[in-house]
Amino acid sequence: MLASILKTAGAALCAAAFAAPAAAAQPTSLTMYYPVAVGGPLTQVVDGMIADFHKANPDVQVRAVYAGNYDETRIRALSAIRGGEPAQLSVLGALDTHDLVEQGLIEPFDTLAQTAEDKAWVESFYPALMANGTLDGHVWGIPFQRSTIVMYYNKDMFREAGLNPDAPPATWQDMLAAAQKLSGNGRHGIMIPSTGYPYWMFQALAIQNGATLMNTEGTEVSLNQPGAVEALQFWRDMAAKHEVMPGGTIEWGTLRQAFVQGRTAMMWHTTGNLTAVRNEAKFDFGVAMLPANKQPGSPTGGGNFYLFKGATEAEKAASLRFIRFMTAPERAADWSIATGYVAVSPAAYETPVMQEYAKGFPQAIVARDQLDVAIPEFATYETARVREALSNAVQAALTGSSTPKEALDGAQATAERLLKPYR
């Protein structure tokens, strides 16, 4: 009996000795901070993609930290890094590039992408989506959770009002005329959100009126130029003068519910809400490019992948492998279908799954088509503070506490003071 026990124990020790080297090879661990800024089960979608990555790459483990909206995610990620907690990558607002570079917090992708395959990958994305992540000749951000603003409209309400449901308004005046016909009985013709991201909606109106708000270097802004003031006045007038929009501010976070509940016939919102609207709306709805005044246009929006400095070479290589996996055409297509965000590369729209999806749901390609007239999202140095000044000005004008000119003059003065050191 004793001999048998000793024999068994010896075999176990021998097996353990052989297993020890394999057990010592621990997977490379990555921490990714990720924003959940709009509706829909995004955490489940991202968790599923990470699980698929783990199956294909058992030597890498990615931990996602979900941290609220873009601003909250940036604050939490940077606080963790400065507190000594490891974090290798994050999805942050595409407009954060200037500040992240200036603070020396991120690595450029083009210097890490050394192989021909990696370099081709960096160049595979839509140029309009790369603009916010490219600075000083380097690529700092890779598009992932990206969007444009689109106009959702209730086709059933259009039919009831005698409007063509297949011909959405293409100009401001067409939109105003349609909104006047669609308003009444407790319903508004149109709603544009003015909390959360008021600067973003204002930038859309400004560019449609021929007003570019900032230079590409992020060092100068022109917030109070005549075209911008006129755009903000038009936004204000839709409520105060024409009464086709609620007065005061309109909540970003609840506007989708207002639309699907029939309280507004049209809304401007991120394409990132598309799948949620499709799942929730009990009526026929359409998606259109934003209407033009002097020209069509929408700013891009959403988040890029960024790589934080301080990672080991193994962590950098693993991060690059993970980001390439997440942005591959087939997964970009699946991501767009699951969320409504823009698939970030032309190759994604050529995949069989996306082509089949677009045939049955053509609303899914409106945001992509709008990239032809899209501009970079409002971004400068001191981005958060400049953006806050602009958003406050927009809200002051919409609530009537300032005229559009007074509000934008104040925002311009604040921005001039903040940006002076960078010129």
Image (tube, grey):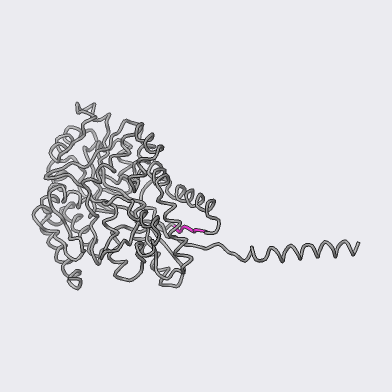
The residue at the far left in this view is 226
Residue in front for this viewpoint, 255 or 415 = 415
The residue at the far front in this view is 116
Residue in front for this viewpoint, 136 or 117 = 117
Residue appearing at x 38%, y 35% in the figure:
357
Q: Is residue 186 magenta?
A: no
Residue 42 location (% of width, % of height) = 42, 48
The residue at the far right in this view is 1
Q: Name above or below for residue 58 compared with residue 417.
A: above
Q: Which residues are magenta?
A: 61-65
Looking at the image, residue 207 sits to the left or right of residue 105; the answer is left
Principal secondary structure, stretch drawn in magenta: strand
Residue 341 location (% of width, % of height) = 34, 46
Residue appearing at x 50%, y 52% in the figure:
53
Tally the marks.
0
Q: Name above or below for residue 169 compared with residue 126.
A: above
Q: Name above or below for residue 257 compared with residue 206.
A: above
Residue 345 location (% of width, % of height) = 34, 47
Position of the N terminus by quadrant: bottom right
Position of the C terminus by quadrant: bottom left
Looking at the image, residue 313 sits to the left or right of residue 230; the answer is right
Residue appearing at x 45%, y 62% in the figure:
317
Q: Name above or below for residue 361 compared with residue 92.
A: above
Residue 309 location (% of width, % of height) = 39, 69
Residue in front for this viewpoint, 345 or 82 = 345
Q: Quadrant of residue 59?
A: bottom right
